[in-house]
Image (cartoon, grey):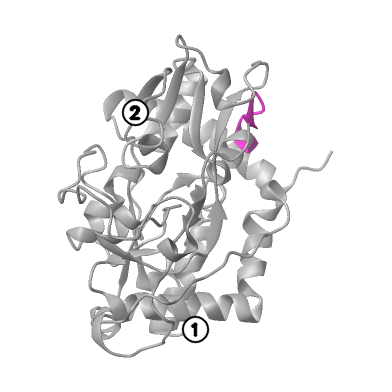
Amino acid sequence: MTRSRHQVVAALIRTVSIGTALICTAVLAGGCATATPDVAVATTTTTAPPTTAAPSSLPAGCDDVEDLADTASYSPKLTDGGTVAAIRQAGVLRVGVSDDTLLFGYRDPATDRLEGFDIELLRLVSKSIFGAATGDERLRFVVMAYSDRLPALEEGRVDLVAHTMTINCTRWARIGFSATYLDAGQRLLVRADSNVDALEGLGTNDRLCVTAGSTSSDNSSGLAVKVVTVPDITDCLVKFQRGEVSAIRSDDTVLAGFAAQDPGARVVGPRLSREPYGIGAKAGSVDLVRHVNAVIEQAFADGTWQLIYDQNLAPTLGAATVPTRVYDRPVP
């Protein structure tokens, strides 16, 4: 039987990337990555606590759950000034990404090139700033863990983060977000022979893996099950394959990539939450967020978003559901 490109890449990642993760995890809690000219490894990937504390309460009118208004961003507008002009003058767009999340941000072992849905969106943004003929030489990929996404923006170490990051009000109080570019939802990954088919099926002796700084961690507090928190989502997969945890709670989009890598795993249960993905920017970078939104809207309008989805996600996730974008956040 002829295997698809995704199956081949998944097999390679399973034997190379996950194997490397097992070795790296034993040495460095946050994993490791091979240094290449276009990739920098975040220096604080093992540090979960953010440098700036989240607000003690949500902004007025924000429930952080299902309200589309909570995902509202600034109106789209291409610009040549402000933050965008500074990036162009610097000659490089610094972007926070994953390099081991199959489908979204991963290093293809066959080509040694970063691939995935999030990566392709960042390439569109880079081309809109530096010109359509430019390649990855204008992108500086900074590989980071989930827990480092917000601190990296707050500290100005990157200009943008595209890393399966959920838009919510708590995060909006710390950084800026593009409009929603993809809708996901939390589910569970369990072993293929497990009789667990929902979160309620986990017992007090089971161990549930979540990542620090993620909405899956926020939503798992108070559960009867033992919750194991790790720096990055790949660490959960390592623990799962070692038999150290019974299940992983994360976005179904990410778990689908894990299931594609591991035939001994399956995704179960209904969606436990709504997880609208956005591209993050430093708070106050309104012109950059508006520019990103204009790029995203153009991608929806000209079919590029659908093409990127079909190339990266459709083989595993099926037909696309176009997300609702809301643009009524007041522009300062």
Residue bearing mark 2? 229
Element on which disc 2 rests:
strand
Q: Is residue 137 rendered to the left or right of residue 113?
A: left
Q: Is residue 305 magenta?
A: no
Distance (Cα) linking label 2 and label 1: 41 Å
* Image quadrant in which you'd find residue 189: top right
Front in this rendered view, residue 248 or 2:
248
Residue 55: x and y in percent read 20, 51
Q: Which residues are magenta?
A: 260-268
Mark linked to residue 132: 1
Q: Is residue 218 left or right of residue 121?
A: left
Mark 1 crowd level (few <14, some 14–19, many ≥20, 10 Å Cα) = few
Q: Earlier in the sequence, mark 2 or mark 1?
A: 1
- Report if residue 288 is visible in the image: yes
Q: Nearer the viewer, mark 2 or mark 1?
A: 2
Q: Name the element at disc 1.
A: loop
Drawn side of residue 272 relative to residue 158, left or right: right
- 306 on left or right of 28: right
Which corner quadrant holds the N terminus?
Answer: top right
The residue under label 2 is which amino acid type?
Answer: Thr
Direction right: furthest residue: 1
Q: Is residue 236 above or below residue 99?
A: above
